[in-house]
């Protein structure tokens, strides 16, 4: 059986190997998909691929690497080996089309639950309905153990070469240095839970923006499939049994249910979720200013610098820059989501497109009033401007009173827009 390890770069809790006596593990470096990733994101993925190959070799197997079009590469391998194909069920429209073209067996590897466990056909909206149903009726399956030994690859099958890993300088201002792969993922999970102060105060700290500890930072490992959501669920449940169970530990699971929700929810949508109509290209200079962190609004610009320089951004930051793009600049959210896809180390199809549509007010639970007053947000979540100064050192000398609106004191050029709602926030 050919096992396509696309976004499931792990051996722990990997149902793709379950019940297969002679797996042929494969990873296809999809040229088109790779072009849509920053070098930093490519590096993060390839680190995980290289580590997985070593681990598979240690078990007696190997990782077959192919570069090119996913359908062509897997079809060639299927013809060459005479084997059927098994894939992790991705939520993307293109991947689902590819899987159909491959006539592949699809296994749920990204989600907490299996499709057949879900107590509904179409995902209920809003999220609360989904959560209530799921929480009452379901428990994630226990994670599977790593395979202990695997059969060798068929004789004569060329394992191929891993593409060279791009050199990317590490970013000293980043929340943490993310190294791709299962070992880093497992040790990050263990380390996060090892200090009870982190998980037991998550609910209070989760809106932070600086440093490694304000939130779990599980997302990059989940996105490349180096960490299984069921493993996290189990580890948090054990923490609750052995150390402490409180609102914060519940909230980590609550957030994993948001991820789960979007994973299923995007699958009910067609192509319109993803492709921005041409007419939205007209405000290109505003879009470029947003991308480059040059809007003139320090809170937005600092977050965009963090994204492009480190490949990560806090949830608070993401909500604000997304609202700013969609509501204040009036641009199509799909332009922003596409830009996130390129940069985010934790880019996850469902979480990204689902959240963008949600913030823009067009997706699950659509609402026109979901507007973030980004200046008010800045004063709440970056009271004294420490975050803004961290990413925009040019503002180092600006005093706390003006840090979020330096233009009002003539300390910076005015921002590219000035929504009327800001007037309530800026003190004369
Ligand atoms: C516009 C926008 C785009 C986003 N794009 C992505 C993306 O591409 N990939 C991604 O993983 N998350 C995305 N998120 C969700 C969220 O911002 C990140 O999951 C979170 O910031 C990752 O940091 P963490 O692991 O420390 O999260 P924590 O706060 O520690 O949360 C624990 C886990 O819960 C899940 N989670 C938390 N918040 C959300 C949420 N709002 N939606 C879905 N899952 C959530 C993640 O898997 C996360 O790792 C996006 C949010 C917004 C507003």
Image (spheres, rainbow, N blue to C red):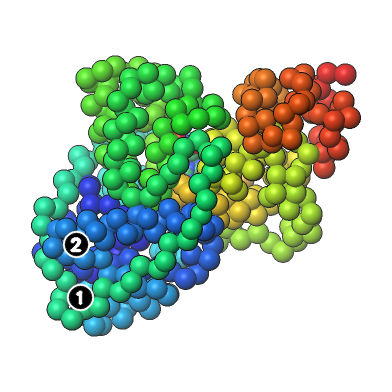
Where is 251 relative to 117, above or below?
Answer: above
User: In x, y percent, where is residue 21?
Assistant: 10, 64
Between circles 1 and 2, the one closer to the viewer is 2
Visible residue check, residue 130:
no
Q: Residue at x 16, y 71 (%)?
A: 153
Residue with the mark numbered 1? 83
Looking at the rendered structure, the secondary structure element under dot 1 is loop
Tag 1 and tag 2, C-beta contact below 8 Å:
no
Looking at the rendered structure, the secondary structure element under dot 2 is helix
Where is 271 relative to 411, above or below?
Answer: below
Residue 168 versus residue 56: which sits nearer the camera? 168
Where is 55 relative to 364, above or below?
Answer: below
User: In x, y percent, where is residue 92?
Assistant: 45, 58
Q: Residue at x 64, y 25 (%)?
A: 386
Describe residue 322's horizontal placement relative to residue 77 as left or right. right
Q: Which mark is residue 57?
A: 2
Q: Which mark is residue 41?
A: none
Describe residue 2's horizontal placement relative to residue 39 as left or right. left
Q: Quadrant of the N terminus?
A: bottom left
Q: Residue at x 72, y 64 (%)?
A: 278
Residue 57 versus residue 37: which sits nearer the camera? 57
Describe residue 89's horizontal placement relative to residue 175 as left or right. left
């Amino acid at each position: 059986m050919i096992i396509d390890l696309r976004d499931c770069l792990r051996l722990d809790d990997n149902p793709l190997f379950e019940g297969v006596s002679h797996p042929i593990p494969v990873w296809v470096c999809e040229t088109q998909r790779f072009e849509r990733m920053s070098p930093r994101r490519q590096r993060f993925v390839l680190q995980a691929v290289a580590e997985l190959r070593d681990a598979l070799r240690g078990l007696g197997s190997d990782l077959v690497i192919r570069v090119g079009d996913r359908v062509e590469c897997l079809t060639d391998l299927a013809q060459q080996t005479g084997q059927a194909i098994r894939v992790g069920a991705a939520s993307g429209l293109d991947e689902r089309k590819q899987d159909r073209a491959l006539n592949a067996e699809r296994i749920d590897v990204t989600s907490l639950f299996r499709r057949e466990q879900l107590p509904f056909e179409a995902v209920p909206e809003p999220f609360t309905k989904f959560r209530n149903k799921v929480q009452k009726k379901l428990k994630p399956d226990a994670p599977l153990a790593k395979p202990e030994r695997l059969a060798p690859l068929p004789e004569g099958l060329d394992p191929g070469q891993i593409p060279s890993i791009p050199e990317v300088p590490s970013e000293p201002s980043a929340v943490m240095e993310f190294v791709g792969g299962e070992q880093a993922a497992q040790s990050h999970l263990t380390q996060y839970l090892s200090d009870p102060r982190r998980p037991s105060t998550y609910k209070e700290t989760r809106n932070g923006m600086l440093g490694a500890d304000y939130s779990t930072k599980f997302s990059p490992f989940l996105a490349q499939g180096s960490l299984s959501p069921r493993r996290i669920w189990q580890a948090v449940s054990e923490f609750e049994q052995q150390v402490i169970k409180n609102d914060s530990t519940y909230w980590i699971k609550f957030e994993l249910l948001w991820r789960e929700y979007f994973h299923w929810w995007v699958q009910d949508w067609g192509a319109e979720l993803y492709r921005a109509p041409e007419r939205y290209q007209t405000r290109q200079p505003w879009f470029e200013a947003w991308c480059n962190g040059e809007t003139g609004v320090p809170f937005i610009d600092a977050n965009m610098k963090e994204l492009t320089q480190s490949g990560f951004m806090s949830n608070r930051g993401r909500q604000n820059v997304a609202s700013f793009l969609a509501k204040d600049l009036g641009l199509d959210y799909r332009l922003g989501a596409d830009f996130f896809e390129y940069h985010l180390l934790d880019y996850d199809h469902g979480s990204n497109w689902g959240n963008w549509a949600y913030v823009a007010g067009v997706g699950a639970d659509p609402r026109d009033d979901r507007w973030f007053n980004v200046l008010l947000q800045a004063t709440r979540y970056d009271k004294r401007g420490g975050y803004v100064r961290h990413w925009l050192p040019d503002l180092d000398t600006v005093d706390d009173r003006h840090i979020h609106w330096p233009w009002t004191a003539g300390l910076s050029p005015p921002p590219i827009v000035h929504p009327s709602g800001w007037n309530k926030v800026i003190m004369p």
